[in-house]
Amino acid sequence: MDAVNDLRSFAKERGLTVYEAVGGVGVRFSDGFDVFWALPDERWHFLNRDSQADGDLVAKFQKLDDRRLRVVDAVRRYLAKQKISVNRKPNGDWEAMDESGGFSVLYVGAGLTKVLTQESNLVAAVQGVFGSSSNIHKPSVHRAKRHLSEFGEPLVEPAWTNEEQEDEIPSTPHNALVWMGLCKALKDESNFDSPEAFVAATQPKGRIGRALLQLAQRLPNAQASVELLDGSMSIDFSDEYDRITVKPRSGELRALIREMGPEKAGDHLADEYERINAARGRVVSAVFESLSRQGYSLDRLDLEGVGREFREFSLELGEELTQTIQQHGEEQAVRFALGQRPLLAEEAIKCLKEPCGKPTIAERELRSPVPAAIELPELTDEQIAKIDERTDKLLHGYLQTEKALEAYGDPLMWDASKDTWTTAADWLRLAERNVGDEYQQLLAKTILIDHGDRSIDPKSLERLWKMEPHHEVAVFDVKMIWQLRQEIPELASKWFDPQSYDDVPFAEIRARLDDPVAVQYIIAGLANNREETDEAVPYALATMSAEMVRRFAGAAQIDAWRADALRWADEKWEWNYGWESDVLNVAANMGWPEVGDRLAHNPYILPALLAPTNQELGILSADRLLLAWSKLVPSELLMKIVGLSLRTDHNLLADRFALFKAGKCGDYFAEHSDIVAQITNAWGEKLGVALAISWRRCRRHESNKSK
């Protein structure tokens, strides 16, 4: 361990990031995109096998650090010269995008480190970063040598953006005509006789074509689209809430052309568009101005919903508003748009006389109005006793079935450090009953291994050697190989060494097994993650031990995630489907009980779960939510929710859901009526087990409080 201590001291003296691991240490390379792992007992790892873990670790680190620094710097210089923007994640997985929007992933993490332990040619290492799957051409030998010889700060690098490039073909009326002509040309094979013939076939022809061309020329910057089924062209009004539609085959257009001629007909249509567009602009601007003055915003998801904090009413800005303008004028149109708020309408009418620009109003996500509160009844001693008896019976029966094997591997259903709803002896009996079943034996074997059975038969070992690593391999096999890594490091190296396009294979599974290499890789991959996501906090935090997360993420980052989880508990308002367990799962794993406390004061959750409307699933789909909540904070409130649900016939709720689905799917369910019963049984059993486990957790919590 002296060599490890020397490396630790060396790194700390130079201000390098140091990660403590069981039996060793990790030091982040100076370039910032991989870690030098000194883990003498982990001989499967390429930095620790054979003689790599022996001798002067400081000298080995310095040599690798220098080589990595030169290669990574050369890669960055090359990318900057190519005007390629890069999201440089600390785990070495770089997202790269060129000026045309072409996307690639470059790997400068553990895979590059392994290459540099074996490859003395740095030019080859630079070129190897741009693998065959990359859309970016690798640098020539001359270019790679040049960048390797450069020193100092990299060139100015383009700012990273993962936004999709704008459509290079504008959606104008003229281009809509081109698409219409193209679709027409494709119907006649003779149009493909020559390029000239094809171009000629796509051009607008005849009186109708000339009228549409005149319309397009008058409105060069409008937004337009084509309906391929009937060949109609729609031109959006500037406010984007309505459009005019021109149908080439309509009798109205033909009559207009007969009366006025093609060009004048096109002018007439353009004049009509401009007149209505200007009127709509004034009306919508006046409506938005009056709303903005009163502090209203548009709902970002429903751009006709309006409110301050909540959705208070809806605007009428579509086709009917256009018709009102045409038939009754702009003042009446304002009253129509704000029909639910007459005082606001009068204010908006005053705004009609003011100069107006492009209609604008703030947009934000607005919640639905706070529903009426639900008061949950107190549970009597008699009710509690009956529920205790029912849940005991339900869980006892569940543990006799092979389905319970899946509960053992589900941390929301079974956490050995907290749960008492079953015992180790129960799990062993369940495993022994199912270990011979071909389908269930892997799950059963997992239980046996966790309870001390570390044996592996020669046939299974031979199977593992013959298997090739791939992304669909069974989790059990990965766990088995991980547990054998010290006895058979060659097998572990085959599976866990960096591979092409995968620096840390099976990282998620290894992270659950407290592999510091995998945990650091996943945590580092969460940094600079600018992809749009609906996750309040990264779900990866639910699958790794909290101690390992704290070790690699740092206090500031964890505090930020914790604050995000609290904000979610305060602000989340869509609960009708009951599928919101992820954040609570993270909070339970990380030990953030205040997230559950805050959730208990969220006014939306109880009405959504216990008083569902519009055939929403409510409590019926809340099995994962209840499991996560009870694992985090088995509170008195949750006990009331679970108790009320257990006293409700959840099979009846499942029937309601099944019948609702049957109504949606009509004929199919009429022919397969047995599926209704299957849905009822599946949902009823799923919810029943979740309620029983949650109840037992709440009861245990209450019992501990009374001691």
Image (cartoon, rainbow, N blue to C red):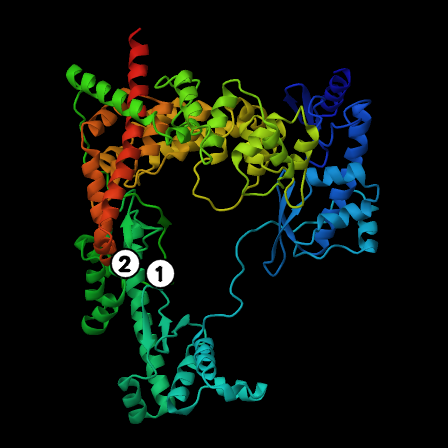
Tell me if 685 is positioned left or right of 36 in this view: left
- The amino acid pointed to by label 2 is Val
Tell me if 242 is positioned left or right of 452 in this view: left
Q: Is residue 227 above or below residue 211?
A: above
Q: Quadrant of the C terminus?
A: top left
Q: Is residue 539 above or below residue 355?
A: above
Q: Is residue 525 above or below residue 532?
A: above
Residue drawn at x 81%, y 43% is 151
On residue 287, the disc is 2
Residue 267's spot in the image, x, y percent?
Answer: 36, 84
Residue drawn at x 43%, y 84% is 213
Q: Does the CB distance between marks 2 and 1 fall below 8 Å?
A: yes
On residue 485, the disc is none
Q: Nearer the viewer, residue 352 or 690?
A: 690
Asked if residue 327 can be seen in this view, the reply is yes
Please rate how many residues cluster around mark 2, counting C-alpha atoms within 10 Å: few if below 14, some from 14 to 19, many from 20: many
The residue beneath circle 1 is 359
Q: Nearer the viewer, residue 513 or 260?
A: 513
Tell me if 692 is positioned left or right of 487 in this view: left
Asked if residue 601 can be seen in this view, the reply is no
Residue 156's spot in the image, x, y percent?
Answer: 70, 49
Residue 254's spot in the image, x, y percent?
Answer: 30, 89
Residue drawn at x 27%, y 20% is 392
- The amino acid pointed to by label 1 is Pro
Residue 435's spot in the image, x, y percent?
Answer: 46, 28
Q: How far is the residue under mark 2 from the one under mark 1?
A: 9 Å
